[in-house]
Image (cartoon, helix red, strand yellow):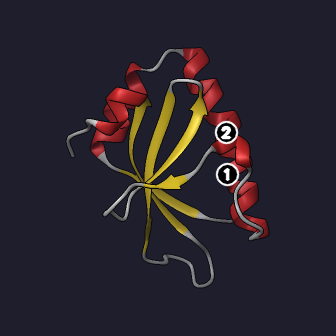
Amino acid sequence: MPTYESLAAFRRQWEKLDASQQAAFRRALAVFVTNLKTGGGFSSQLRIHKLANTEIWSLSWAKDGRALFRYGGQIVPGETHIVWEAIGTHSEAYNFKR
């Protein structure tokens, strides 16, 4: 099972999401975790892509919902570790402050 942590910015932004937005992210997260566990790449519905010239990746959880993450050092040997950086609308997620 992948491990994860979230930055303070992500947690602050998470609290600002309404219940339906949080539910949409959780649905996308279930697909994301399944993809990580199977190792076969990511589902196209998540529209995951790496941001240019960074170590940050973007995951789409709704039409205008984005979550930014990066890969961290392994906590459990052999398991992927994810660091959640930011979450919100497209403009909010891409203008986050750590």
Left or right relative to 14: residue 26: right
Which residue type carries mark 1?
Answer: Phe
In the image, what residue occupies the spot 26% across and 35% down? 95
**Which type of secondary structure does the marked residue at label 2 adopt?**
helix
Instruction: Work out whether residue 40 or residue 74 is closer to the camera in this orientation and state it.
Output: 40
Residue at mark 2 to residue at mark 1: CA–CA distance: 6 Å
x and y percentages locating residue 49 in the rendered image: 52, 54
Question: How many numbered marks have been drawn onto this rendered protein structure?
Answer: 2
Q: Nearer the viewer, residue 22 or 46?
A: 46
Q: Residue 28's mark?
A: 2
Where is residue 82? Give x, y as percent.
Answer: 49, 61
Q: Quadrant of residue 33?
A: bottom right
* Residue identified by numbered label 1: 32
* Identity, as a three-letter code, of the amino acid under mark 2: Ala
29 sits to left or right of 76: right
- Which residue is located at x 56 percent, y 21 percent? 21
Locate residue 41: give its quadrant: bottom right
